[in-house]
Amino acid sequence: AQSVTQLGSHVSVSEGALVLLRCNYSSSVPPYLFWYVQYPNQGLQLLLKYTSAATLVKGINGFEAEFKKSETSFHLTKPSAHMSDAAEYFCAVTGSGNTGKLIFGQGTTLQVKP
Amino acid sequence: DAGVIQSPRHEVTEMGQEVTLRCKPISGHNSLFWYRQTMMRGLELLIYFNNNVPIDDSGMPEDRFSAKMPNASFSTLKIQPSEPRDSAVYFCASRPAGGGSYNSPLHFGNGTRLTVT
């Protein structure tokens, strides 16, 4: 079975500071990994995805994530936080075998302070 | 592209009543997923379909929940009878099916917020 663990349910940063949201995965097969963002009262939107090409993946809104197989990690970063980045962020991994089931982490709420 | 469309956006019902949530996936997407989101349990996959066929329903909580996909453009999630613990936001998502599609992202609707009193 595959799983995702997001370390820290709440992260608070100041505007302009580095954003780091942590995600570790467990998978017995090469994983596909995703980061999604959810704004209040909306569905989830894709930020970026890793699909076994480049290990450093760039996404929308200045976010990027690096796949590190040795650490089984896929942490999300942004050099400089904006107030508009305040939202909930989810890391996800495809399910086991070839079912294509997408498993989500518990989510991390990002607060950006002025 | 209209995106994934869910209805209703909000549903308030009394315990014991039947609730039906509806979803229209993106045209051309052959995989459809139903998720439930709560503060306590996060995002849980309830069931998903490929080409209108249920592939994995292991996340369906109990027999009170049922889902159907009668055609490629419509799916329903029904709860009968509803209970207060079913209160949550229910999301529908779709994705193209077929080889290599597992690295394609899911497209989510805006969800249905269900409150059972």
Image (spheres, grey):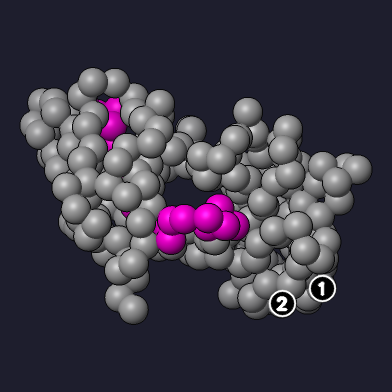
Marks 1 and 2 close (CB-CB < 8 Å): yes
In depth, the one of A83 and A33 nearer the eye is A33
What quarter of the picture does the N terminus of chain A occupy? top right
What quarter of the picture does the C terminus of chain A occupy? bottom right
A96 magenta-colored = no
Question: Between marks 1 and 2, how big is the CA–CA gap?
Answer: 8 Å
Subunit ID for the residue under disc 1: A
Residue occupying the far front of the picture: B99
Question: In the displayed structure, does residue B78 sit left or right of residue A91?
Answer: left
Q: Above or below — where is B116 with respect to B7? A: above
For residue A79, the mark is: 1
Instruction: Give me the residue at 24% from left, 57% from top.
Output: B72
Question: In the displayed structure, does residue A88 sit left or right of residue B48?
Answer: right
| Residue at the spot of label 2 | A62
Question: In the displayed structure, does residue B36 sit left or right of residue A103?
Answer: left
Q: In x, y percent, where is residue A45?
A: 50, 65
Count of numbered marks: 2
For residue A2, what is the image quadrant?
top right
Residue occupying the far right of the picture: A70
Subunit ID for the residue under disc 2: A
Q: Above or below — where is B110 with respect to B38? A: below
For residue B67, what is the image quadrant?
top left
In depth, the one of B46 and B116 nearer the eye is B46
Instruction: Give me the residue at 66% from left, 62% from top.
Output: A49
Q: In x, y percent, where is residue B17?
A: 8, 31
Labels 1 and 2 in the same subunit: yes
Is residue A85 at all visible to an observer of this figure?
yes
Q: Secondary structure at mark 2?
A: helix
* Tag 1: amino acid: Pro
Which numbered mark, 1 or 2, is in the foreground of this view?
Answer: 2
Q: In x, y percent, where is residue B24?
A: 24, 60
Q: What span is colored magenta in the figure?
A: B83-103
